[in-house]
C-alpha cells in the first residue's frame, strides 16, 4: 500500500512495534481494568483526541484558538437535538453536527484570517464567538435553554443509537483517537502539512513563496472544527446531558488546549502524552485532596502542577521525554 | 409612557456610566501591562477578585470601609505584582503567546481556588451605611456607593496619568514601551521597569476590586468572567491605550445596563461580545487605539 508506506516512511521499526503493542494493549485493556480504570482511560483518550484536533490548528498551522468549545458544543447539541426531537440516530446526525461545526469554523476562521487577526486578537475572536453562542443557546427553547438537554438513559445496548455502557464509548473514542493520530501523521507528511508549518513559522514568507495562506488556514480550521465536533457528539451521548454553561464554557475551551500544550505543541505524541499526564495528575489530586476537606484543593494542586510544567518544560513534556528515551520525534 | 421609558433609559445609562468607570479602572491595569510588556494577563479578573475579597475581609473582620482599605490593597498589590513579574513572568517575556497563556492560567487557577479555599463558595458582599443613600439631580437618581466608586476610579486613573506623564519612572516606562531596544541603549533598567509596570497594573486592578465590592457581591467564580470583561473592554477601547481603556469601560458599562433594560439582564454580555466581534473585525486597533498597530 502506497499510502501505508508513506505513513510509516522514516519511522524506526522499533517505534512501529511499540505503537503496535500499545494499540493491542488498549484493545484488550477493558478486560483487565475495572470500572474506574476504564473511566480514566476513556478520559485520557477523549483529551488525546480533542487535543489532536486542536493541535492541527495551533500546533501545525499556528492559529491560537481559545474557543474550541464552540465546535464541541455545536456538534453535541446538533446531534443530541436531532435525536431528542426527531429521533434521528447519531450515526446520521453526526454528519449534520460535523457540517454545522465545520461551517462555524469556516465563518470564524474566514473572518479572523480575512481581517488578518493574529495571536491574541484571533484568540479573542474565537472566545467571543464561543461566548456569544453560549448565551444564544441559554435562551434557545429548542436546545432546552439554560435548563439543559437530556437524553434518555437506557439500560439496553443499542449501537445504532449510541445507547450503551462505557465499553461502547471506550471503543468509539479509541477508534477516534487512533484515527485522528493517523490522520495527523498523514497531514504532516502531505504538502498541506508542509504549507501549514511554513505558515506557522512565517506567514509572510510563506505567502511570498506562493503558499495559498488563506486557503491552507481555512482547511486547518475546518478539519480541526470537524474533529472537535465528533468529540462533542461522543461527549453528548456518553454523558447524556448538555448545558450551555458547560458545553460552550470558556473552561471547556481551555481544557481542550491543555493536553497538546503540556505534551508538546505541533508534535504527534504531544496531545497523547499531555492527556496521560493531565488526566493522571487530575485523578491523583482528586485522591490527595480528599485528605484536606478544603474546597478548591484539587485545583490548587492542578495549578501548581501546570506552573511547574510550564516553567521547567515550556516546550512540553513529550520532546523532552522522547529525547530521554532516545526516540526523538523529528520535530516538524 | 414615553417619558417614563426615557427616564428609565436615562437612569440605566447613568448607572452604566458609573459602573463603567470602575470597569475602566480594572481594564486600565490590563492595558498598561499589555501596552508595556506585550504580556497578556490571563489572570486579570482573578487578581481583581482577590482585591474584592481583601476589601470584604477588611470590612467584615476589621470594620474598615473598602474606600479606606483601598490604598492598603493597592500598595499590597503593587508589591505582589512587582514580585510576580520579577520572579515568574519575567522569563516569559517575548516567549510564544501560548506559553504566557499557560503560565498566567496556572496563576489564575491558584488565585481563584485560593479564594475558594479561604472564603468558600458563598457570595460575599459589603453592607455599608451608605448602601441605600442616593443623590438626586433633577429626575435622575444616583446611588451613593456607585457614585463614590466611580469618582474614586476617575481619581485613581488621574493619578495614573500624572504618574505616566510627570514622573521620571513613568516616562521611562513609556520609553521602554515605545522602543525596548532604545530604552536598553540609553541605559534604562528595563527589567525593573517591567516589574514596576506589573506592580502598577496590579495596584490598579486591586483598587478596582476594592471599589467593585461596594457595588457587586463577590464569588470566586466571577473571576473568569471579569478576565473576559477586561479583555472585551481593552480591545474595544484599544489595547495599550489609557483613554481607550476608560472609554471602553464606559461603553461596555452603558451597553450592559441598557441591554439589561431593553432585552434581558442575562443577555447583557451578549451585546458586549457582539461589540467585541464588530470592533475586532472593523477596527482591530480599538475605538481609541492608534492605527497601524
Image: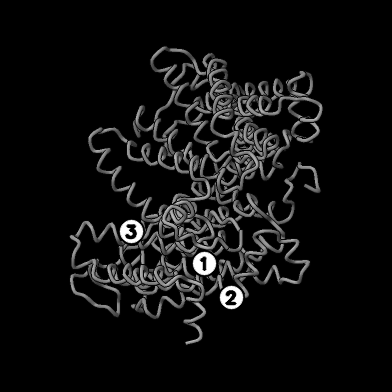
Disc number at residue A225?
1
How far apart, in angstroms, are the residues tagged by discs 3 and 2?
Answer: 30 Å
Quarter containing the C terminus of chain A: bottom right
How far apart, in angstroms, are the residues tagged by discs 3 and 1?
Answer: 20 Å
**Which quadrant would residue A294 be assigned to in this image?**
top left
Instruction: Please provide percent x and percent y for residue B162.
Output: 75, 20
Say which of marks 3 and 1 sits in front. Answer: 3
**Which quadrant would residue A188 be assigned to in this image?**
bottom right
Measuring 50% from the left and 59% from the top, which residue is drawn there? A68
The answer to whether tags 3 and 1 share a subunit is yes
C-beta proximity under 8 Å, tags 1 and 2: no
The first of marks 3 and 2 along the sequence is 3
Measuring 36% from the left and 76% from the top, which residue is drawn there? A90
The first of marks 1 and 2 along the sequence is 2
The answer to whether tags 1 and 2 share a subunit is yes
Nearest the viewer among B269 and B177 is: B177
- Check disc 2: other Cα within 10 Å, few if <14, some if 14-19, many if 20+: some
Q: Is residue A84 visible?
A: no
In the rendered structure, the answer to whether residue A149 lies left or right of residue A98 reads left
Measuring 69% from the left and 68% from the top, which residue is drawn there? A214
Q: In the displayed structure, would residue A166 be above or below residue B229?
A: below
Instruction: Please provide percent x and percent y for residue B218.
Output: 44, 31
Q: In the displayed structure, would residue A101 be above or below residue B95?
A: below
Say which of marks 1 and 2 sits in front. Answer: 2
Say which of marks 3 and 2 sits in front. Answer: 2
- Check disc 1: other Cα within 10 Å, few if <14, some if 14-19, many if 20+: many
Residue that numbered label 2 is attached to:
A190
Instruction: Please provide percent x and percent y for residue B170.
Output: 74, 23
Q: Secondary structure at mark 1?
A: helix
The first of marks 3 and 1 along the sequence is 3
Residue that numbered label 3 is attached to:
A43
Amino acid at each position: 500500500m502506497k499510502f501505508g508506506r508513506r505513513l510509516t516512511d522514516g519511522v524506526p521499526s522499533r517505534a512501529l512495534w511499540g505503537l503496535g503493542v500499545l494499540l493491542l494493549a488498549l484493545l484488550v485493556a477493558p478486560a483487565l481494568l475495572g470500572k474506574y480504570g476504564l473511566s480514566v482511560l476513556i478520559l485520557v483518550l477523549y483529551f488525546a483526541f480533542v487535543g489532536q484536533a486542536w493541535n492541527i490548528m495551533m500546533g501545525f498551522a499556528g492559529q491560537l484558538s481559545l474557543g474550541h468549545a464552540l465546535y464541541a458544543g455545536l456538534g453535541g447539541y446538533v446531534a443530541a437535538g436531532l435525536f431528542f426531537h426527531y429521533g434521528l440516530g447519531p450515526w446520521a446526525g453526526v454528519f449534520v453536527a460535523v457540517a454545522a461545526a465545520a461551517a462555524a469554523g469556516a465563518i470564524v476562521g474566514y473572518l479572523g484570517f480575512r481581517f488578518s487577526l493574529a495571536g491574541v486578537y484571533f484568540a479573542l475572536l474565537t472566545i467571543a464567538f464561543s461566548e456569544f453562542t453560549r448565551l444564544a443557546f441559554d435562551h434557545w427553547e429548542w436546545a432546552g435553554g439554560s435548563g439543559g438537554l437530556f437524553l434518555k438513559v437506557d439500560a439496553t445496548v443499542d449501537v445504532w443509537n449510541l445507547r450503551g455502557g462505557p465499553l461502547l464509548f471506550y471503543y468509539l473514542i479509541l477508534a477516534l483517537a487512533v484515527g485522528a493520530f493517523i490522520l495527523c501523521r498523514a497531514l504532516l507528511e502531505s504538502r498541506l502539512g508542509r504549507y501549514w508549518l511554513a505558515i506557522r513559522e512565517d506567514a509572510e514568507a510563506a505567502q511570498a513563496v506562493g503558499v495559498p495562506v488563506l486557503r491552507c488556514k481555512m482547511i486547518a480550521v475546518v478539519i480541526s472544527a470537524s474533529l472537535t465536533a465528533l468529540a462533542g457528539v461522543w461527549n453528548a451521548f456518553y454523558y447524556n446531558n448538555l448545558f450551555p454553561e458547560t458545553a460552550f464554557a470558556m473552561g471547556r475551551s481551555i481544557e481542550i488546549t491543555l493536553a497538546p500544550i503540556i505534551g508538546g505543541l505541533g508534535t504527534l505524541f504531544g496531545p497523547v502524552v499531555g492527556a496521560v499526564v493531565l488526566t493522571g495528575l487530575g485523578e491523583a489530586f482528586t485522591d490527595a485532596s480528599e485528605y484536606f476537606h478544603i474546597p478548591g484543593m484539587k485545583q490548587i494542586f492542578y495549578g501548581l502542577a501546570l506552573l511547574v510544567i510550564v516553567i521547567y518544560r515550556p516546550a512540553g513534556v513529550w520532546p523532552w521525554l522522547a529525547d530521554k528515551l532516545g526516540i526523538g520525534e523529528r520535530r516538524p | 409612557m414615553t417619558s417614563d421609558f426615557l427616564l428609565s433609559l436615562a437612569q440605566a445609562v447613568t448607572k452604566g456610566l458609573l459602573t463603567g468607570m470602575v470597569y475602566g479602572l480594572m481594564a486600565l491595569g490590563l492595558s498598561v501591562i499589555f501596552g508595556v510588556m506585550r504580556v497578556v494577563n490571563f489572570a486579570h479578573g482573578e487578581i481583581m477578585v482577590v482585591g474584592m475579597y481583601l476589601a470584604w475581609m477588611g470590612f467584615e473582620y476589621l470594620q474598615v470601609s473598602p474606600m479606606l482599605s483601598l490604598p492598603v490593597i493597592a500598595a499590597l498589590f503593587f508589591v505582589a505584582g512587582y514580585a510576580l513579574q520579577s520572579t515568574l513572568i519575567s522569563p516569559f517575556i517575548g516567549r510564544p503567546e501560548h506559553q504566557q497563556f499557560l503560565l498566567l492560567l496556572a496563576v489564575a487557577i491558584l488565585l481563584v481556588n485560593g479564594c475558594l479555599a479561604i472564603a468558600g463558595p458563598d457570595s460575599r458582599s459589603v453592607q455599608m451605611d451608605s448602601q441605600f443613600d442616593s443623590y438626586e439631580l433633577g429626575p435622575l437618581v444616583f446611588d451613593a456607593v456607585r457614585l463614590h466608586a466611580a469618582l474614586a476610579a476617575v481619581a485613581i486613573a488621574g493619578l495614573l496619568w500624572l504618574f505616566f506623564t510627570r514622573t521620571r519612572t513613568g516616562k521611562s516606562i513609556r520609553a521602554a514601551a515605545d522602543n525596548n531596544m532604545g530604552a536598553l541603549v540609553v541605559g534604562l533598567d528595563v527589567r525593573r521597569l517591567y516589574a514596576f509596570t506589573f506592580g502598577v497594573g496590579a495596584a490598579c486592578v486591586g483598587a478596582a476590586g476594592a471599589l467593585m465590592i461596594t457595588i457587586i457581591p463577590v464569588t470566586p467564580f466571577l473571576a473568569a468572567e471579569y478576565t473576559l470583561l477586561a479583555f472585551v473592554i481593552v480591545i474595544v477601547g484599544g489595547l495599550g491605550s489609557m483613554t481607550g481603556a476608560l472609554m471602553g469601560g464606559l461603553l461596555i458599562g452603558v451597553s450592559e445596563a441598557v441591554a439589561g433594560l431593553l432585552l434581558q439582564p442575562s443577555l447583557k454580555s451578549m451585546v458586549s461580545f457582539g461589540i467585541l466581534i464588530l470592533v475586532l473585525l472593523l477596527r482591530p486597533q480599538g475605538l481609541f487605539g492608534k492605527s497601524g498597530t
